[in-house]
């Protein structure tokens, strides 16, 4: 690949618009500032989202998953997301405390369209609210409450090109390094990657919630 030169680097909005032209009319009309009944249907069928957040320290993009409907639609402007047990880095939560801007990307297995919500988030540790998201006897320690500013769906092109829902496009897990392999390679102290991988299925079962 050739190195980028100043002449090839796009650095202004005018340059971008000269390359891409005007957006299609339908790409603008689909964007609204509330959760319509059609968009609510996507949210309630989605078992997986990606949550993006931002702060001075940097950006974060975090996967979130649960049975379909785990993102609760409260009203036409508000959704709630339980913060399930993870690695305790809490990068997303740290960002939200500093800067409320977030973006959600909803995926529905087998469906080509995706849905986005751009908005502002806050974190609630209200015991009653957290308890309402109990799963398998485990209660999340907090709930992320998102107020929608912009809501719109994305067409099928990216999903179609990636073939992400196509069983024939799936690869064998063994074609990639395991979590244990990666952690052992990066650890500055002795770390048994094989033992980590061997014990992970039971650890996942015990700590998923």
Image: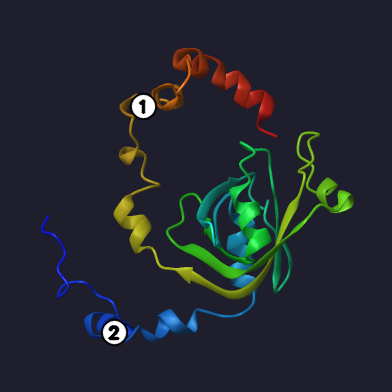
Q: Is residue 156 above or below residue 152?
A: above
Image spot of residue 131 (x, y percent) = 84, 46
Disc 2 element: helix
Q: Earlier in the sequence, mark 1 or mark 2?
A: 2
Disc 1 and disc 2: Cα gap in Å?
41 Å
Which of the 4 quarters of the picture holds residue 188?
Answer: top left
User: At 31% across and 39% down in the image, what residue appears?
Assistant: 168
Residue found 58% across the figure and 54% down from its top: 46
35 lies left or right of 31: right
Relative to 207, is 116 on the left or the right? left
The image shows residue 172 at horizontal and vertical percentages of 34, 28
Does residue 111 appear to the left or right of 3 in the view shown?
right
Q: Position of residue 35 (x, y in %)?
A: 64, 73
Q: Which residue is mark 1?
A: 177
Label 1: few (<14), some (14–19) or many (≥20) C-alpha neighbours in 10 Å: few
Quarter that holds the N terminus: bottom left
Q: Which mark is residue 105?
A: none
- 182 or 58: nearer the viewer: 58
- Compare residues 79 and 170 and report the one nearer the observer: 79
In this picture, residue 78 sits left or right of residue 14: right
Q: Residue at x 29, y 56 (%)?
A: 161
What percent of the width, then of the height, locates residue 95?
61, 57
Q: Secondary structure at mark 1?
A: loop
Q: Which residue is mark 2?
A: 17
Q: Residue furthest front?
A: 188
- Check disc 2: other Cα within 10 Å, few if <14, some if 14-19, many if 20+: few
């Amino acid at each position: 690949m050739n190195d980028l030169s100043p002449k090839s680097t796009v650095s202004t909005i005018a340059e971008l618009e000269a390359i891409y032209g005007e957006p299609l009319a339908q790409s603008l009309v689909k964007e609204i500032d509330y959760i319509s009944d059609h968009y609510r249907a996507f949210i309630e069928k989605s078992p997986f989202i990606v949550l993006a957040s931002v702060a001075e320290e940097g950006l974060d993009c975090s996967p979130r998953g649960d049975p379909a409907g785990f993102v609760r639609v409260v009203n036409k402007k508000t959704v709630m997301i339980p913060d399930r047990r993870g690695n305790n880095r809490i990068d997303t939560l740290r960002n939200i405390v500093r800067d409320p801007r977030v973006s959600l990307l909803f995926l529905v297995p087998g469906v080509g369209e995706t849905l986005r919500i751009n908005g502002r988030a806050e974190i609630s540790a209200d015991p009653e609210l957290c308890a309402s998201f109990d799963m398998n006897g485990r209660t999340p320690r907090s709930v992320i409450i998102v107020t929608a500013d912009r809501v719109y769906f994305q067409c099928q092109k990216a999903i179609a090109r990636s073939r992400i829902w196509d069983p024939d496009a799936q690869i064998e897990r063994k074609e990639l390094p395991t979590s244990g392999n990666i952690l052992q390679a990066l650890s500055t102290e002795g770390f048994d990657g094989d033992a980590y991988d061997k014990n992970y299925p039971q650890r996942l079962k015990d700590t998923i919630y």
